[in-house]
Amino acid sequence: MQPDDELSERRRAARVAGMVYLLVVLSGMFSIAYVPGQVTVRGDAAATLQRVAEHAMLYRWGILAGFICSTAFLLLPLALLRVFAEQDLRLTALMVALAAVSVPIAFANAFHRLDLLALSAAPATLTPPVTAGLAWQAIAGEANGILVSKIFWGLWLIPFGLLVLRSAVIPRTLGVLLVIGGVSYVVDVVCRTLIPEFRAFPIAGFVTMPASLAELSTCGWLLLGPIGSRRA
């Protein structure tokens, strides 16, 4: 393949990866952030269950968005393989593997949301204390599943960032941000696991901000930014 053809192919691959990344970002924000923000009443499982019942269709859309996000996330590293063609095979394999591990966890975690949805329409034979207890289990189970998923949301960004640093396809600054973002996810998981009250700390909501910044910036660059040729 001629250099110009190779560069054109790499740019097309980057745009495809960017579109898949954008789908992950938008569906993930809707499913993981927006919908829970509308229905979750922190510390009150019964009230959360009532809000799920009141916003059942929104909650169903959130579940569907989660399925879309997980499927797109499985495809994303495969799309990125074409962008980083002929790069370190070990890093690319590690990137794909770490991203892929989180997908079955995410799909399994959807059972907790489906359980909560079913409970919101539970028959009257179930007493409020029973439904509240089952709702609490579903809510806690989903939170724990997200915590486990975060490990791999972070780890896959590290080889991804290293691939960026070793190539001329995407600016090296984004590679640095991706690595820092990956580490920030892992730090967040460690803190939330070892410090039970960490979620109440003011800093807790900011720990993974480097990851959000890195992923949004990289997604935007893949979609709209100039794509360089492979570094020799």
Image (cartoon, rainbow, N blue to C red):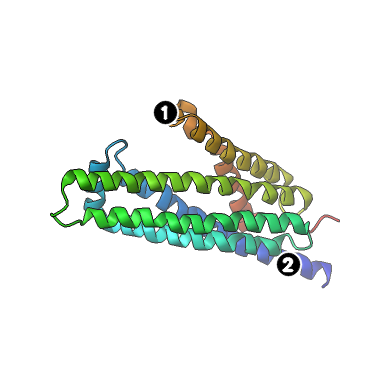
Name the residue that disc number 1 marks.
200
Q: How far is the residue under mark 2 from the one under mark 1?
A: 49 Å
Q: Residue furthest left?
A: 124
Q: Which mark is residue 149?
A: none
Q: Is residue 226 visible?
A: no
Asked which quadrant contains residue 226, the reply is bottom right
Quadrant showing the N terminus: bottom right
- Toward the viewer: 15 or 117? 117
**Residues at marks 2 and 1 touching, judged by CB atoms closer than 8 Å:** no
User: Where 175 sits versus 204, above or below?
Assistant: below
In the image, is 108 to the left or to the right of 160?
A: left
All told, the count of numbered labels is 2
In the image, is 24 to the left or to the right of 133?
A: right
At label 1, which amino acid type do we have? Ala
Q: Residue furthest bottom?
A: 1
Q: Residue at x 71, y 57 (%)?
A: 92
Q: Secondary structure beneath disc 1?
A: helix
Q: Secondary structure beneath disc 2?
A: helix
Q: Residue at x 75, y 56 (%)?
A: 90
Q: Residue at x 60, y 55 (%)?
A: 99
Q: Around disc 1, counting alpha carbons within 10 Å, would you say few (fewer than 14), some (14 to 19), or many (20 or more)?
A: few
Q: Find residue 66 and report its horizontal and vertical position in percent.
A: 43, 57
Name the residue that disc number 2 marks.
8
Q: Find residue 77 and report its horizontal and vertical position in percent.
A: 63, 59
Quadrant showing the C terminus: bottom right
Q: Is residue 189 visible?
A: yes
Q: Around disc 2, counting alpha carbons within 10 Å, would you say few (fewer than 14), some (14 to 19), or many (20 or more)?
A: some
At label 2, which amino acid type do we have? Ser
Q: Find residue 165 and report its horizontal and vertical position in percent.
A: 75, 47
- Toward the viewer: 109 or 52? 109
Q: Find residue 56 and report its horizontal and vertical position in percent.
A: 26, 56
